[in-house]
Image (cartoon, grey):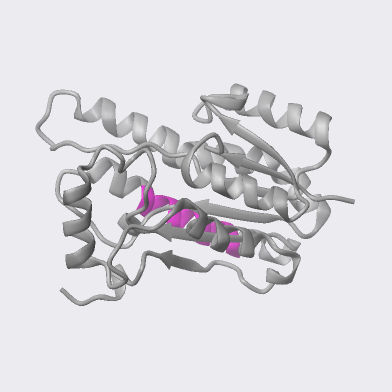
Amino acid sequence: MSRVAIVTGGASGIGRATAELLGHHGVEVAVVDRNGGIVADISDAESVGRAVAEVRNTLGPIDILVNAAGIPAGGTLDQDDYVEVWEKTLAVNLTGAMLMVRACLDDLVGEGSGRIVNVASTEALSAGARTSPYTVSKHALLGFTRSLAVELGGRGVTANCVCPGATLTSMTEGIPAEDREKFAGRHIPVGRYGRPEEIAHMIVALTAPEASFVNGAVITVDGGMTARSH
């Protein structure tokens, strides 16, 4: 019997690459996204509940949850809409992941082999200027992952966190190619941005039945960027 996965943010970027790769591995995949698949607002508990119920009724109990949905955010503390940006960013990047886990929890625990993979960022491991809402949300998502690993590990559920570095997605497509190349040359040992498919391979590996002893891990997929000393 095929396993069932939900991938949030699965209509584009890393989420879409993950959904496609899971499908290639024989997993029944439901995409939950504001722009495709099962349309939902993951920051709203009722919307999440309806989406998960639809997946359960259509495909069966959920074995795998990949929280790949996220929004970028920047700004300085003194800007007029900073609080609004802060609240929206945490609502999607952090609270959304929590609501999805809660909605899928009975299935994940009931199967005794549930897999949760949260997609954070290298921003979860460091900090940059003018990105504090995003940075805080990703630091918190990492902490949430570790808490899940400790709380649910004894019930057969693993929770791990993948931290992509600079990746060619809609979040970075607005950066001029020349600037991307300059950044990669200075900061990324492999000399380029990553591809969504490369991040997806790590995510999918963590969902495998054989990955049952990988729990609470924080794995960077960044071409060596965080290993480089500056």
Q: Position of residue 178 (x, y in %)?
A: 17, 50
Say if 148 sits above or below 56 in the image: below
In the displayed orientation, state which residue is furthest to the left: 78
Looking at the rendering, the stretch of residues picked out in magenta corresponds to: 138-150
Residue lying at 19% horizontally and 53% vertically, measured from the top left: 128
Task: Specify whether 34 is left or right of 183.
Answer: right
Q: Is residue 178 left or right of residue 151?
A: left
What quarter of the picture does the C terminus occupy?
bottom left
Picture coordinates of residue 97 (x, y %)? 53, 42
- Residue visible at 43% across and 52% down? 120
Query: Which residue is pictured at 44% across the width and 57% down the height?
Result: 143
In the rendered structure, the answer to whether residue 93 lies left or right of residue 229 reads: right
Is the magenta region chiefly helix, strand or loop?
helix
Residue 52: name its quadrant.
Answer: top right
145 is within the stretch colored magenta: yes
Q: Position of residue 41 (x, y in %)?
A: 52, 25
Q: Nearer the viewer, residue 25 or 122?
A: 25
- Picture residue at 68% right of the left edge, 23% below the top: 50
Is 230 displayed left or right of 3 in the figure? Answer: left
Q: Is residue 192 above or below residue 54?
A: below
Of 37 and 175, nearer the camera is 175
